[in-house]
Image (tube, grey):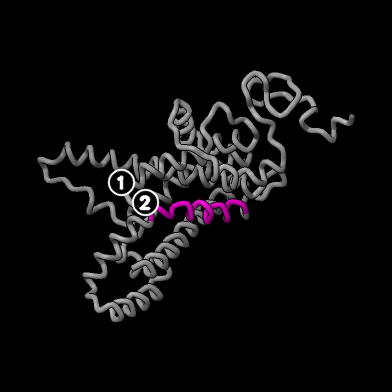
Amino acid sequence: MNTSQEPSLAPHVCKSCGHSFHGTYCNICGEKVIEPKDRKLEFLATVLISTTIVDNKFLKSLRLTLGNPGFLSREYVDGRRVMYMKPLQMFFILNLVYFFFPVLQMFNASLYTQLNVLPHSNLARRMVAQKIVHEGLSQQGFELIYNDKTTNLAKLLVVIFVLLASLPLSAIFQKKNRFFTDHVALAVELTSFNMALNAIGLSILFLVFSKLFHWGHFTWGSYLNDITLTLIFIITNVYFIFRAAKTFYNQKGKRLVIKAMLGVVGLFLALEAYRFVLFIITMYSI
């Protein structure tokens, strides 16, 4: 029988433990041989079967995401998976924390920001004016309703940001050996990075500082508005994209700098596009 036509019968070297074996799964550590068809369908399959059970892999994977962005995604798409938590599993766990606890709304935008700061503000003002007249609400009353509604939706719809972020990544870092789902995997890791560091991590940090400086009437909430959170998003994502461009996409030299900067711009545009989508969904849900 021609083993070149039967991948399961061809000899393989396990990418996790280095053991030589025949078949689809390593008989030592259980790592699966990843074929092109698996990478094309892996994202949709993972959405259906992924679980949110935290084990020691979670802390290891989170540490790698924060300390070496792009490494976890590279290991995942290259077929070294049993030693780490899948990026989508880690995303669901962090999203669960992001959803149920009062953390910073890194992906959200208040009504004030939607009406006065973002590129679509002119359209937003017209839509809000029509909504207020139609519903018979005051500006202040509508703002309270909007901000409460959009806060919950932002936590629920953050997966939309993942898909939007994968688009500029796939366009800027085009490589022959990268599928679109590979870029999605990196976008999942990037979103987990932002939830862990910028939403949950910063919330814990500033809550601690608030307790320590309570005697001095120190309040951090007034300083962490949508504008400063966007600046924090840009600065931290510069770090992520530069590291990921080198680790995940193997970029070097001037190409690394140019593509990483383009990647940061692309992610900022993805964030603004997400906020526009969030605004539209919030408006139609009120």
In the rendered view of the protein, which quadrant contains the C terminus? Answer: bottom left
Is residue 254 visible from the viewing direction of this image? no
Query: 10 Å neighbourhood of mark 2: few (<14), some, or many (≥20)?
Result: many
Magenta region includes residue 259: no
Query: What distance separates the C-alpha of mark 2 from that of mark 1?
Result: 9 Å
Identify the element where label 1 is drawn: loop
Q: What stretch of residues is rendered in magenta?
A: 154-170
Magenta region includes residue 168: yes
- Residue at the spot 55% in from the left edge and 44% down from the top edge: 48
Locate residue 183, reporting x and y percent.
59, 47
Query: 10 Å neighbourhood of mark 1: few (<14), some, or many (≥20)?
Result: some
Q: Which residue is disc 1 drawn over? A: 103
- Residue at the spot 56% in from the left edge and 52% down from the top edge: 166
242 is higher (above) or lower (below) than 229: above
- Residue at the spot 59% in from the left edge and 35% down from the top edge: 76
Between disc 2 and disc 1, the foreground one is 1
Report the amino acid beneath label 1.
Answer: Val
